[in-house]
Image (cartoon, grey):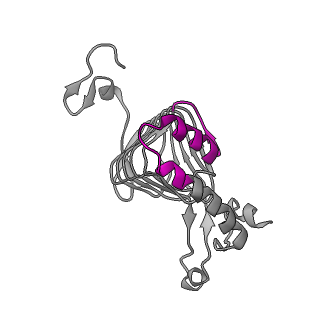
Amino acid sequence: MNTFEKLHSGCLYDPADEEIMKEQLKCLDRLYDFNQTRPSEMEKRLKLLSEMFAEIGEGCYIEPPFHSNFGGAHVHFGKNIYANFNLTLVDDTHIYVGDFTMFGPNVTVATAGHPILPELRQKGLQFNAPVHIGKNCWIGAGAVILPGVTVGDNTVIGAGSVVTKDIPPMSVAVGSPCRVIRPVGERDREYYFKDRKIEGNLA
């Protein structure tokens, strides 16, 4: 197994490896360029994202500043994904996000972990586990999604939640650790927020 295969294998490896750091630095330079763009430079932003990401669909928008260990090189975005300020993608291995998903400000999605055993951490070792986020999800402000987690389609993750385990589709889940509090249901077809009704044929 070569150095870069270890990134995606789940095995322990040294992230300070010279080859890894050389490749990572190239990615971070492009990320820097993206974060220095002006709000009026939308075409430039889109071009940079298409170069930075492993995959990115049409209609995606990421509000700078955007933070990412590999500048999106291991990130797979569907179409029409929106990310507010300070999205952090710890993309040491792959992150998959489905169409129409939205990220509130200050969301972190992490694929990298470190061993519990102190002696292994002292050696600087790391492991990675991919994250899958489904279609049409809403990840609330300040949420943290940890390595290896899958979030199902059409799910809402409440603001400030820490997602340590898989969350099923069509769920509203909140808390630390994040837990499902209810399914997306019939009441949600009538009310969009507390007692505020959906008017007309929006749904």
Query: Residue 7 in the image: x percent, y percent?
Result: 68, 62
Q: Which of the image's four quarters has the N terminus?
A: bottom right
Relative to 24, say whether 106 is above or below: above
Relative to 66, say whether 185 is above or below: above
Query: Residue 198 in the image: x percent, y percent?
Result: 27, 21
Q: Is residue 61 magenta?
A: no
Q: Residue furthest left?
A: 195
Q: Is residue 42 visible?
A: yes
Q: Is residue 45 magenta?
A: yes
Relative to 167, say whether 58 is above or below: above
What's the residue at 37%, 20% (across, down)? 203
The front one of 184 and 91 is 91
The front one of 195 and 83 is 83
Q: Residue furthest top?
A: 200
Q: How many marks on residues?
A: 0
**What stretch of residues is rendered in magenta?**
31-59
Is residue 145 left or right of 175 when viewed as pictured?
right
What's the residue at 20%, 27% (across, down)? 196
The front one of 19 and 125 is 19
Query: Residue 33 in the image: x percent, y percent?
Result: 53, 51
Q: Is residue 70 visible?
A: no
What's the residue at 47%, 51% (across, down)? 35
Query: Residue 132 in the image: x percent, y percent?
Result: 56, 47
What's the residue at 33%, 13% (across, down)? 201
